[in-house]
Image (cartoon, coloured by chain):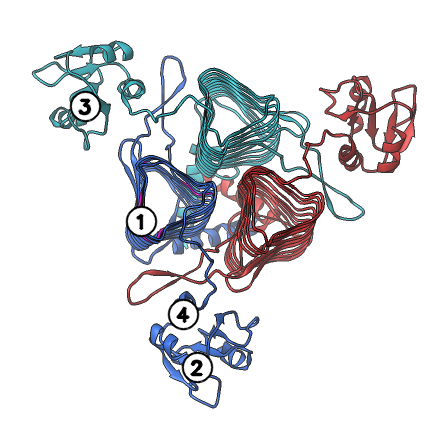
Chain colours: A cyan, B blue, C red
Amino acid sequence: MREIADWIGARLFGDGSVELRGISSIAEASPGDLVFVEDERHLERALASRAAAVIAGEFFRAGDWKPVLVCDQPRLAFARAAQRLATKRQRTAAVHPSASLDPSAECGAGVSIEERVVIREGVKIGQRTWIGAGSVIGAHAILGEDCELYPHVTVYPGVRMGNRVIAHSGAVLGSDGFGYVRDRSSGRQEKFPQVGRLEIGDDVEIGANSTVARGALEVTRVGRGTKIDNLVHVGHNVEIGEDVVIAAQTGVSGSVEIGDDVVIGGQVGIGDHVRIEAGAILGAQSGIPSKKVIRGRGVVFWGTPARPIREYLRELAALARMAKRR
Amino acid sequence: MREIADWIGARLFGDGSVELRGISSIAEASPGDLVFVEDERHLERALASRAAAVIAGEFFRAGDWKPVLVCDQPRLAFARAAQRLATKRQRTAAVHPSASLDPSAECGAGVSIEERVVIREGVKIGQRTWIGAGSVIGAHAILGEDCELYPHVTVYPGVRMGNRVIAHSGAVLGSDGFGYVRDRSSGRQEKFPQVGRLEIGDDVEIGANSTVARGALEVTRVGRGTKIDNLVHVGHNVEIGEDVVIAAQTGVSGSVEIGDDVVIGGQVGIGDHVRIEAGAILGAQSGIPSKKVIRGRGVVFWGTPARPIREYLRELAALARMAKRR
Amino acid sequence: MREIADWIGARLFGDGSVELRGISSIAEASPGDLVFVEDERHLERALASRAAAVIAGEFFRAGDWKPVLVCDQPRLAFARAAQRLATKRQRTAAVHPSASLDPSAECGAGVSIEERVVIREGVKIGQRTWIGAGSVIGAHAILGEDCELYPHVTVYPGVRMGNRVIAHSGAVLGSDGFGYVRDRSSGRQEKFPQVGRLEIGDDVEIGANSTVARGALEVTRVGRGTKIDNLVHVGHNVEIGEDVVIAAQTGVSGSVEIGDDVVIGGQVGIGDHVRIEAGAILGAQSGIPSKKVIRGRGVVFWGTPARPIREYLRELAALARMAKRR
C-alpha cells in the first residue's frame, strides 16, 4: 500500500500495511482491490465497498475508515496504480518456433514473438517488444522498445515506430494511400506511386482495425503520445502532432496537418489539405472541407462544414423556431 | 417438398412429391430450386420461372400451377427453408495439425478448428463450434456451442460468448476501450486500465472488421439475438439489449445503453453515456450527443442532433423554402 | 532517360543519356531521381532541386537546364514513369512451404504465395498473382492474373476477380450481407440466406480493412477500374460500374446501383436501392436516403439528404443569416 502511495504521489490515511492485489470498479470490488472516486458524491459508496483501499481527491476528510490515498488527480493516480496492480497479460520472452524470421532481421533482448508471425528482411525490433500471433512485419520496418502489437497487425515495408507504441488487432500501418491520376484521354484512373514512409512516435496507441497510410512520395507522421481509436483512417502525407486524441471512425484525408493537443470526436471527416491548429476540439461527426484552417485552442467546432459550436447551436435553434412558426 | 412445407408451416398446393434441391432468386432459378414471393405483383413471374416450387403469401389463389407453399410470412418461411436447402459450407469436425492449442484448452465434441488457429490457455469451446483459419482465441475466453468464427477473427482474453454466435472475418472482439486520463501537469494522456470483460449473448452475429471493446473495469454486453453489420464500433462498458439491429459503420461510444428491439441505421454516431430505450429507430447518419436519452417504441429519429423525423423533415423543408425566398 | 520519355510519350529537352534511378518529391530528390511539376509556379524549384530530370507540362520553355520531359499530363506521365522506376517490392515466384494448398487448387505460372496462406478446394489463381502472408482464399474462388493480395486478405468462397486486382491488408471480400427477416410472432431476427456471389472486375483496387459483401441470392459486382479506399463498406447485391472512385469510410447499402465514372467522397452513406447515375459526384459525408435516384454527370451533390451543392450552400448561407438576425 505504502509503496503504491509513493508511486502515485498520494498522502496515505489509515493502515499502510494492507496488501493490494488488484484494481476494480466500486461495484465489483473484491477484498484486496484498489478503487477510486473523483467526485465526493461517490465517496461513501467507495468506503462502504469491499475494496481494500480507495484513491480519493482533496475533498476527503480523515475519519475512521479503510485506508484512503488522497491526491490531486485521483483518476490519473488510479491509472498509474493500475500499471502496478492490474493483471499483466503473460508474455514469454521468446520467438515461437512457428514464426518466420528472415535471417537479416534483428531482435533486441527480451522480445516476444508469437505463433505464425512473419518478419521480413532488414527488420529491426527493439528490446522487450511483443508481436502477437499472426502479425506480419514488412521489410526494413523498424520497431522501438516495449512496443505491443496485438495479433493480426500488418506493418507494411519501411514503417518506423518509436518506443512503447501499442497497435491493436487488425490495424494496418503503412498501406498505400488513395492516389490516382485520371487519364483525360481514356477516362481511366491510373495509380499514383505510393512509395513514401510512415513514422509513428513514442507512446502512440492505434486502435483495432484502424488504417494509417504511408506517404505517396513523402512521409506520413503520427506524433508522440497521440492516441487513435478503432476504425480510424489516416491518409497519406498526413502530419499529426503530439498528444492528439482521435475517437473511433474518424477519417483524415491526405495531406492534412493536425497540431499538438487537438481533440477529435468520433466519425469526424477531415478533407484533404486541411490544417487544424494546436488545441482545437472537433465535435463528433463534424466535417471540415478541403483546405480549411481550423484555429483556436480550446474552441469547440461542430457540424458540417464545422463552425464554432455556439454559432452552430444558434443556427439549430433558429431552424427549429422557423419550422414551428409555419 | 412436403417435408419443407411441414418445416416452415405452410399449406401445400400441388404435387408434394417434387424434390427440392436448392434456393434461388426468381431470375436465376434452376429446376429443383425453391423461390419466394412476398408481393402478389411478382407471383406470375415466379410461377413462370424455372423454379420447382414457390413460397407465397395468403394472396395466392389455387390454380393449375407448379407447387406452391402458402404461408403468412413468405420471406421468413423462405429463410427457414434455406437452412435445409442452401448448400452448407463443408467443415470437417477436426483440429487441423497446424493449429496451436494450449494443452489446457477444452474443446467440445465435433468442433472444427482450421489451419493456423491459435487457442490459448484456459479457453473453452462448445460442441460443433467452427473456428476459421488463422483466428486467435485469447486466454480464458469461453465460446458456446455451434458458433461460427470466420477466418482472421481475433478474440482477446477473457471474452465470453453464448451459443450460435457468428463472427465474420476481421472482427476484433474484446480489444481495449479508448480511455485515457490527461495529466494536468504534463498535458500527456495516460492509459486508463482496460481490464473488464466482453460478454456476447446467444444468436448474435457480428460483421466483418467490426470491433467490440471489453469493459474498462466493468463489462461490455451484447444481448441475445442482436445483429451487428460490418465495420461497426462498440465502445467499452456498453450494454446492448436483445434483438437489436445495427447497420454498417455505426459507432457506439463508451457507457451507452441500448434497449431491446432498437433498430440503428448505418453510420449512426452515438455519444458516450447515451440511453436509447427499447424499440426506438435511428435513421442512417444520425448523431446522438453525449448523455441524451432517446425514447419511443417505433419512433424514428434522424439528423444530428437526432430528433423525431417529422420535426427534422419540417426543418429541412423550412430551410429549403427560406433559401429560395432570397 | 530516352526510354522513359518514349514510355510516357514526352518530348525530351536536354541530355537524354542521363540515367534515372528512382522517383521522388521535389523536396526529397536525390541525384538519379525523376520529379514532376504540374504547375509553372513550382518549375523553378524542381529545376533547382537535386533531381536528375523533371517532367513538366506544356508551359515549359526550353533553356539551359537539366533534362526536362514535356507532356500534356505531367502527373499522369510521372505515375507511368514510376511503374518503371519505383523500387518494386520483391516477390519470389514460389509457393512457401508453410502455405496450405488444397490439391485441387490450380495456380498459374509465376504465382507467389507467401507464408501461412490457405487456399481451399477448387480455387484457381492466374499467372503471376501474389498472395501475401496469412491470406485465406475460400473454396472455388477464382483470381485472375497479376493480382496483388496483401497479407491478411480474406476471400470468402466463390468470389471471382479479374486481372490486376489489388486488395490491401484486412480487406474482406465476399462476406455475408446483412439480411434478416423479423418473425412477427416472436420478434426475433432470422438470418436471410446470403449465398450469392461477388464479382470484381479487372484493375480494381480495394483498400485496407474494406468489406465487400457477396450477394444474398444474386451477385454483387464491382466494375473494371473502380478504386475503393480504406474502411469502405459495400453491401449485398450492389452493382458498381467502371472507373468509379470511392473514398475512405463510405458505406454503400444493399441493392444500390452506381454508374460509371461516379466519384464518391469519404464517409458518404448511401441507402438501400439508391441509383446513382453515371458521372455524378457525391461530396464527403453526404447521405442518400433509400430508393433515391441521383442524376447528373459532373453535378456535385452534398448534405444529408444530398442535394445539388449550389442549393445546399444557399441553404447554409440562409441559415447563418437567420441565426445572426436574432
Distance CA(mark 2)–CA(mark 3):
69 Å
Q: How many numbered discs sit on the rendered protein? A: 4
Could you classify mark 1 by the number of other residues whose Cα lies within 10 Å: few (under 14), some (14-19), or many (20 or more)? some
Q: Nearer the viewer, mark 3 or mark 1?
A: 1
Q: Amino acid at mark 2?
A: Val
In the picture, which quadrant includes the N terminus of chain B? Answer: bottom left
Subunit of label 3: A
User: In the figure, residue C3 lies in which quadrant?
Assistant: top right
Subunit of label 2: B
Residues at marks 3 and 1 on the same chain:
no
Q: Which residues are magenta?
A: B158-172
Image x and y of residue B184, in percent: 36, 16
Image x and y of residue C1, in percent: 87, 28
Could you classify mark 4 by the number of other residues whose Cα lies within 10 Å: few (under 14), some (14-19), or many (20 or more)? many
SS at circle 1: loop
Can residue A228 be seen from the camera position used here? no
Label at residue B68: 2
Q: Nearer the viewer, mark 2 or mark 3?
A: 2
| Residue identifier under label 1 | B108
Please tell me which residue is depicted at 43% across the width and 67% down the height of the picture: B82
Distance CA(mark 2)–CA(mark 4):
13 Å
Q: Nearer the viewer, mark 2 or mark 4?
A: 4
Residue B310 magenta-drawn? Answer: no
